Image (cartoon, grey):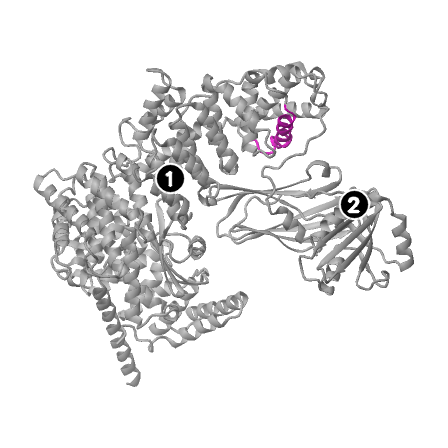
Amino acid sequence: MPAVSKGDGMRGLAVFISDIRNCKSKEAEIKRINKELANIRSKFKGDKALDGYSKKKYVCKLLFIFLLGHDIDFGHMEAVNLLSSNKYTEKQIGYLFISVLVNSNSELIRLINNAIKNDLSSRNPTFMCLALHCIANVGSREMAEAFASEIPRILVAGDTMDSVKQSAALCLLRLYKTSPDLVLMGEWTSRVVHLLNDQHMGVVTAAISLITCLSQKNPDEFKTCVSLAVSRLSRIVSSASTDLQDYTYYFVPAPWLSCKLLRLLQCYPPPEDGAVKGRLVECLETILNKAQEPPKSKKVQHSNAKNAILFEAISLIIHYDSEPNLLVRACNQLGQFLQHRETNLRYLALESMCTLASSEFSHEAVKTHIETVINALKTERDVSVRQRAADLLYAMCDRSNAKQIVAEMLSYLETADYSIREEMVLKVAILAEKYAVDYSWYVDTILNLIRIAGDYVSEEVWYRVIQIVINRDDVQGYAAKTVFEALQAPACHENMVKVGGYILGEFGNLIAELPFSGPVVTVLFCHLAPCSSTFSQRPRRLSKRCCAVTARSMSWLVHLQQTVHNSDQYYVQTSEVVSPVPQATVLEEMPPFPERESSILAKLKKKKGPGAVSVTELEDGKREGGELNGGGERGPETAAMASCVSQSTPSPSADLLGIRSVAPVGASLSSAGSLLVDVFSEAGPAAPSAAVNDDGFLRYKAVLWLSSCKVSAPPSEDPAPPLSEADELLDKFVCKNNGVLFENQLLQIGIKSEYRQNLGRMYLFYGNKTSVQFASFTTTVSCPGELQPQLNVQSKPVEPLVEGGAQIQQVLNIECITDFSEAPLLNIKFRYGGALQNLTLKLPVTINKFFQPTEMASQDFFQRWKQLSQPQQEAQKIFKASHGMDTEVIKAKLLGLGMALLDNVDPNPENYVCAGVIQTKGQQVGCLLRLEPNAQAQMYRLTLRCSKDLVSRRLCELLAQQF
Amino acid sequence: MIKAILIFNNHGKPRLSKFYEHFNEDIEQQIIRETFHLVSKRDENVCNFLEGGMLIGGSDYKLIYRHYATLYFVFCVDSSESELGILDLIQVFVETLDKCFENVCELDLIFHVDKVHHILAEMVMGGMVLETNMNEIITQVDLQNKMEKSELLLADKCSFA
């Protein structure tokens, strides 16, 4: 017989649920729910007293509605009334409602507490359990005040039923977590610890969670639990698989409890008592031995349970870090798992090895697995596993393998999942810095990092490279030369320009002998233009360093202009352009970077917590930094690292991240982490007032500079280069005005547009596909290069926050000044979680949007056709059909193009002929089109004749993609 | 500690949500959506653990899940729990449901949300594991059902009288 009989449910409830399930739309569902809510409300408010059954039914309905995601703001009172019912089922549903819909109304809590009090003293174990559950689920301060002294009594009383004891243990744990000051264990301590000896395994299971938590907070008071835990564990481990009957899970005796016992032991150092320690080592060896035995069952549950214990045992061995023999066995076992066919085991093995790598006994042993780990990074299908592999590579990195590991991580970055790129970038940056034997390798690595994953290189990382270059004479010339070369690449990431601008500004003089480079100057200019104009809008966001970059690159340009008089194009009469005072300031040397700890380290710590960086690594860094800089003299940045250690914890040798001792993991981690972050945030961004001053000054300089430069205004380059598929996306919209322009996992962009004469209006819809808010959402529309004077696009800024699942709209007004070929760019930036998303698309504004159809007779058409007979007025293309050659589709496309489709003009009825006029602000461009399909060859010949030659060519290009 | 236990179907419709840490309703719904979003896009045969949920707990926080036919069972836990242990726990939960409902299916969870809550309450309390022994859990559930039956019977008798 099933334990739950299906027939005796509440009929009204079932009908209601079926109704909801039959709703065809979200609206219908909401309507049905509102109707039901109104009904329940009126029933509750009505004069007629409801019987328990009805109350129960309505409360169940409310629970169901709540599960569907609707707010429930009433019914609490009725639920409380159910608590005092003496019928079990009514009481049960009342407690359930209150546990699910916790309400902090204090009057209500008082009533609930009263009901709980009654049930606790009822001596009915079922009622007591319900009450204890309720306390554990709500766990509020008021409840702790009311019951914190009562629960321990119930827990240790001799006559308490086992099931009540279990509930009491976890209830007490919950109260201890919310209000530790109210739970005074004192007199109960020893009796609680002895619950580990309880005959009922369920009681031990519940009690061990309580004891673990209490031990973490008061290790000394609870240390007697160690020997009890060891003997309990030993009894379980050595038992036959049938001894524990119901607690044997797929032939493994009490796996859950074994795991919990091993966790509890991780709160303490190895036992001092030789006998206890011997017994424990025996247990651990038995567990390791069992892993090698043939499985007792082929079921995955069997191996899961067995391995759960094994992994906890390995954690304990790593935690003790004192038994070389066990450590080696643990490492070998993990090595086997690294190549196991079960993904879960590979994942866990990588994770455990990460902590093992920080043990001095086994660091070398871990290193032997490097090839397997690199292979995992390259071939694992699952991002979770790849992430673990990257973590392990980071943890096992030292001087001997740094170059290999950094190279592997860099190459992985090219294809890495977006979600982990930022962290990978930080790790590469830290490793490159820590193990840099020669700093030219360091500079190369960071520049590669920017090249490969520029978007994910945070300010901290590129500040740091500048900081290091400034502080190290020996690398400055190399750095200047390298960035100079890097900036000549056809497309440079914004961060590359920033680093390049800064370094050239500082040390450009060291490479004066290199030939003058136009592209480098242009790229710096491109960066300067948008930068300087945004200073005023976001003084807080752009830190002082950013301004400094602009100042630095400008100073380099000044320098160039002073030295390179032979290049007319870039020659500017500096005396006219920059008044003597600012010029002098521009050429001033930057003050040295204030010394502080590596901000990237702080950032990674903030991000990761456990396993990220251990104090030993920091000490390594110190030591190696010392060597690099020659004996006692310490590199400035390593000195800063050292100071960070001493600032963070009272004793520099204390375990900063709690890797060695698991006990204080939770507390010490967060405090150490946040302290570091505080240190950083204090030293990080410049004081606002100074920044504003700087900004104003810089803007002044920049405007002065650019306005009088004879250099033709360079295109304002967008932060991210347009997506590779941007052109394809653009092609989709040549013949249509509405649709989805772009979609990825996070964002969907829809477009609606309308055009009249030379004006257009475009509605952009940005949809957040995730459930998480996008922050700092900004969009920028720009007209690059020669498009600038040809097309005028105006947009209003959008709201900076886009809630999960929400859509926001932006309107663009477009004016066509004269004919154009390029498309305007749309740059979108926002923060999703921590990561900055930055993407650039082409907006589907093409010249044909400004077509006015023109009807004309055959005679007129050919007359005009002949008039436009100069060779440059005609553009022709012969191309293969890339879609079917269906007449109706072709016609629809030509109409979508915006021209008039003329019938009975061409003597050959198979051909299509169109005419239209493109409206621009300055002039009208007449266009004639002829499309000749050849169905047999599946080819087209497309001919365009326009009164303006560039237009024919552009239209021809656009159209050839459409058929 | 277990922060939340979520069951939803392949389309993301929640069938059970139990939070052991207090969030307001909107955040709870967001967590359910985010979790579904993260879990549903994963292939079968990848590992059963993943990080990346941003709404609860940050880096010290994992999703451990199993996918059974039309339903996802997801436990959101912090680093104090054994991953494989939680996987076993999910299995115990599902096997228990299967026994209590006789070949449990999605509809059972829909029409008997209260029962599912009661069964879960016998296993997990305040985010900690209360009992892992399936027979013990089922004994408790049977006890509840007996009481329910006797109350029903009593009610019938009263109405005849």
Q: Nearer the viewer, residue A511 or A668?
A: A511
**Magenta stretch: includes residue A535:** yes
Span of residues in magenta: A517-539
Which residue in the protein does label 2 denote? A951
Task: Residue type at mark 2: give it.
Answer: Val
Callout 2: residue from which chain? A
Which residue in the protein does label 1 denote? A608
Q: Is residue A446 above or below residue A893?
A: above
Q: Could you tell me if residue A677 is visible in this image?
A: no
**Residue at the front extreme?**
A937
Task: Residue type at mark 1: give it.
Answer: Lys
Q: Quadrant of the N terminus of chain A?
A: bottom left
Where is residue A630? Give x, y as percent: 36, 16
Q: Could you tell me if residue A386 is visible in this image?
A: yes
Q: Residue at x 69, y 44 (%)?
A: A823
Q: Is residue A692 above or below residue A671?
A: above
Where is residue A956? Give x, y as percent: 75, 49
Q: Quadrant of the C terminus of chain A?
A: bottom right
Using a 10 Å C-alpha cutoff, classify the residue at mark 1 as few (fewer than 14 neighbours), some (14 to 19) or many (20 or more).
Answer: some
**Residue at the left extreme?**
A275
**Mark 1: secondary structure:** helix
